Amino acid sequence: MALNALSADEARARLHELTVIDVRTPGEYASGHLPGAHNIPLDHLDEALPMLKSAADRGDLLVVCASGARSETACRRLADDGITAATLTGGTTAWSQLGHDTHRPAGSRSPWAMERQVRLAAGSLVLTGLVLGRRLPRARALSAAVAGGLVFSALTDTCGMARVLAKLPHNRPKSADLEATLAALSR
């Protein structure tokens, strides 16, 4: 199934007529998002389906993430429920690289992007495996497992470590925030 996709420039030109859904974690969303975007993390998409269906009935949906991979996953899930949505080619990374405006919630700290969190976790685990491996040779298996996971991640364009990190408290939406987002979509 071919997905609908908009380039950053096309999305910018149509931003006033699109309902933008950002499927990144709340921390990533707070670091900068498209103007008017609503944050519904990918793992909460099923909860938001009724409101997204309603929003899609009123106009076009644009789903965004950092690179486009999670938004493609979200678009496929939406399509399975009969909801048509487009993805932003290259995600917020492409949007920002072209110099398009991003918004940040007032007073929000600038959390790390998921990619940076994955690099820190993977690097820390590899280093731990190597250091412990000097005394306990079996500990090197930790480094090998992380390396294997990174290769698998690259080949499949998925990231199990990101899924695990997304469950940490700073990456989870507060229920009040998600409820407010869903209420805004119902208007």
Image: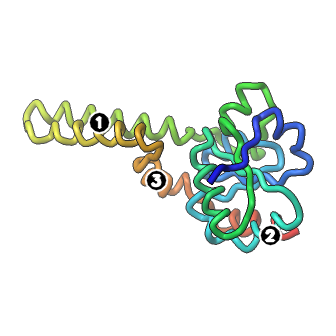
Label 1 sits on residue: 147
Label 3 sits on residue: 163
Where residue 179 appears, as percent x and y from the top left, is 72, 69
Q: Amino acid at mark 3?
A: Arg
Horizontal side of residue 150 vs 10, given as left or right? left
**Residue at far top of view:** 98
Taking the spot 64% from the left edge, 38% from the top edge, the residue there is 110
Disc 3 is placed on an element classified as helix
In the picture, the disc for residue 183 is 2
Viewer-side residue, 108 vs 161: 161
- Residue 38 against residue 90 in the figure, above or below: below
Q: Amino acid at mark 2?
A: Ala
Where residue 102 appears, as percent x and y from the top left, is 78, 37
- Residue 114 against residue 53 in the figure, above or below: above
Q: Residues within 10 Å of mark 2 (few under 14, many from 20)?
A: few
- Report how many numbered discs are placed on residues in the image: 3
- Residue 161 against residue 150 in the figure, above or below: below
